[in-house]
Image (cartoon, coloured by chain):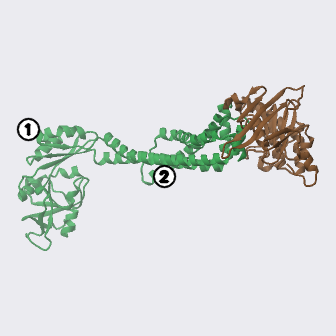
Chain colours: A brown, B green
Amino acid sequence: MSAAPAPAEPEVLTLTDVGRTYPGSPPVQALRDVTFSVQSGEVLGIIGRSGSGKSTLLNVLGLLDLPTSGDYRVEGERVGSLSDREQTALRARFFGFVFQESFLLPSLSAQENVELGLRPRRMAPSQRRQRAIDALEQVGLWHRRRFLPGKMSGGECQRVAIARALAQRPRVLLCDEPTGNLDERTSSEVLQTLIDNQPPEVAVVMVTHDMGIARTLPRLLSVRDGVVSEGPGEFLDAETQPGGERP
Amino acid sequence: MSGLGSALSEAVTSIVRQPVRTLLCALGTVVAVGAFTTTNGLTESASNAVSASFNELRATTVEFQGPSTLSEANVAQLARLRGVTRAGLVWDLDQQQPLSVVVGPTTTGPSQTQLSVTAMSPSAFPAIGAVLSSGRFYDPGADLHHQMVALLGSGAASQLGINSSLGDPAINVSGVVLTVVGIVSSSQQESQALLGVIVPPYVAGVITGNHDPRRVIARTAPGAAQLIGRQGPMELDPYQPGLVTAEVPPNPSTLRSQVQASLSTLLHVLSLAGLGIGFLVIAAVTIMSVAQRRSEIGLRRAVGYGRLEIARLIVLEAAGVGMLGGILGASIGVLATAAIASNDHWTPVMNTTLVLAAPFLGVAVGVLAGSYPAIRAARITPMAALRS
C-alpha cells in the first residue's frame, strides 16, 4: 500500500503504519498498518463493505478518533503529540465534515446551523453571518435560509450540512456516505453540489458504497478487514459480474 | 475558543427555541423559589402581625407579686409614676382554692357549688380591661362603707343560674352573704376571674382574712413597661422592695426577633427542601437532555467545540433555566404572599432584597445542578456521540 504520488501538490495528510484497535475481549483491530497520503486538492474515495473499517479510517483522518499505533501527520504535524485541546483546534481549522445524516439542530434555522460550524472561531457575528449566507448561496439554498430543518426535505438538509462544511473553508473535506440516506436523483444533485463547490486546493475524502459515485472519483482506496489497498480492489470488478457483491 | 458572549447567545437561543424543555426544566426552580419567596413573605407578614398583636395586648402590662401587706395606698404610689396609666390590686383568696358558693342568703341549697374567689380593688377593673354585661362595678365607697357586694364572672353567673344583676341577687360565700351588683363578661387580663366571684378588699378580709399574697396589675404607656418593672417594687414597698417581684413583658424588639427566629427556622427547612427539589429536577432534566443531545454534542465537537465549550454551554443553559425559574418563582411567591396575607387581614411584608436575589438564587441552583451533566457531556467523545 503506497500512496499515489502527486508531485505538484504537497501532502496534507500522511499515514504510516497506522492502526486502530478497540479494547475488548477479544480486542477488535479495526485498522491495520495503514499507509497512504493525501495531497492538497486531491479527491479520494474510500470503498469497502460494511464493517470493513472505512468509517473508522475517516474518523481517524478527521481526528474524531485517534490511532493506537503508527504515525499520523497533518501537514507534517504529528497528531499523537497534540493535546486534546490542540487536536480540537486543528480539527476546527483543518477539517470539514459531511456525514450520512445531516445532524442539523432542529431548533436552529438553516443559516444558524451553518453558522454553528463557525462559532468556535473568533469571528465577528457579521462576518460569520455573511459566510453562512455565502455558503447557502453556493448550495442553492439562500432562499431557505430561515427555514427550520423540519420544514426542509432530506436533500435540502444534506445541502445545508454541506454548506456548514463549506463555510468552515476547510483544507480537507471528509464525507462519510454523504448521499447514503437520499434517493438516486437527490443523491446526484447533492454530490454535484459537493464536488462543484470545492476550491481546487481543498482535498476531498469520501467514504461511499455507491459504485456509481466511486467510478467518478479520480482515486480510490479499498478497505477490507481493516487493511487499506490502493485502487478499487475487487469491488468494481465484482459489481460488473453476475452475483457480484456490492460493497 | 468561542467567547463567553457567543456561548451566552447560544444558551439563550437554546432556552428560547425549546420552550417545552425549558419550562419542564424550570418547573423545579419555579416551585423551589416560589416556596422560598412565599414562605419568607408569610414569615415576615406573620411576624409583623404577631408582633403588633403582642405589642398591643401584652407590651403595656406589668404584673407585680408582693406580700399581703400591699395596699391600695401602695398602688396609688405606683400609679403616680410617669408611664403608669392604670394600676389595681388583685389577689386570689385561699390561693385559688375554691370556696363554697350558694345562691341566696342560706349556706346550703340546690345551687351550691365550688368557685374561686378573687379580690380586686375598684382601680383594677380598668387595669385588667374588664367589661360588664350587666349591672355596675363596685366603687371605692364599697370598701369605705364596708358594703358586702360582689361581682360574678360570666362563667360563674351561668353556673349559678344568675343571668342578670337586676334585683340585686344574693349569694352566700363561705357563710358571708353578698349582693351581686354586676356580671363581668370579658377581661383582657385575669380571664380566670370570669370563672369565679370578684369581691372588694374589705369583703376578702371578711371571708378569709388578709393573709394571701397580692398582685398589682399596672398598665403602662407604650415603651414604659421595662422601666416601670424596674421602678415599681420600690414604690410598692419602699422598705422591702426585694419582696416585690415584677413580671414585665418581653421587649417588643426582642419578641419580634424571637418570633422571626422561630419562624425563620421553619422557613429555612422548607426553603432548603424546595431548593433541593429544584436542584434535583434541573439535574435530572439536564442529564436527560444531554443524553438526548448526544449527536448534537458530537457534531459540535466535530466542528471544533472543545470539552470546556461544551461544558460551558450546558452550564449556561442550566443557569438560564434556573434564572427563568427564579424570576417566575419569585413572581408567584410575591403574588401568593399578597393573596394569603390579604385573606388573613395581614399587611403583606416582603423582603425586597430576597425577592430581587431570587433570580440569582435560581442561577446558583442551575449552575450547581448543571455542573454534573456538563462534566458528563464534556466527556462524550465526538465519534461515540455521532454514532449514537
The location of residue B152, given as percent across then percent down, is 18, 62
Q: Which residue is mark 1?
A: B239
Q: Residues under labels 1 and 2: Cα distance?
A: 58 Å
Which three-letter amino acid code belongs to the residue tagged 2?
A: Ala
Which residue in the protein does label 2 denote?
B339
A38 in relation to A101, above or below: above
Query: Furthest residue to the front?
Result: A26
The chain containing the residue under callout 2 comes to B
In the image, farthest residue toward the bottom: B110
**Residue B5 shown left or right of residue B129 in the figure:** right
Badge 1: how crowded within 10 Å, few (<14), some, or many (20+)? few
Does residue B57 lie above or below B103 as drawn? above
Note whether residue B279 is visible.
Answer: yes
User: Could you tell whether B110 is left or right of B326 in the image?
Assistant: left
**Image x and y of residue B359, in percent:** 54, 41
- The N terminus of chain A appears in which quarter of the rendering? top right
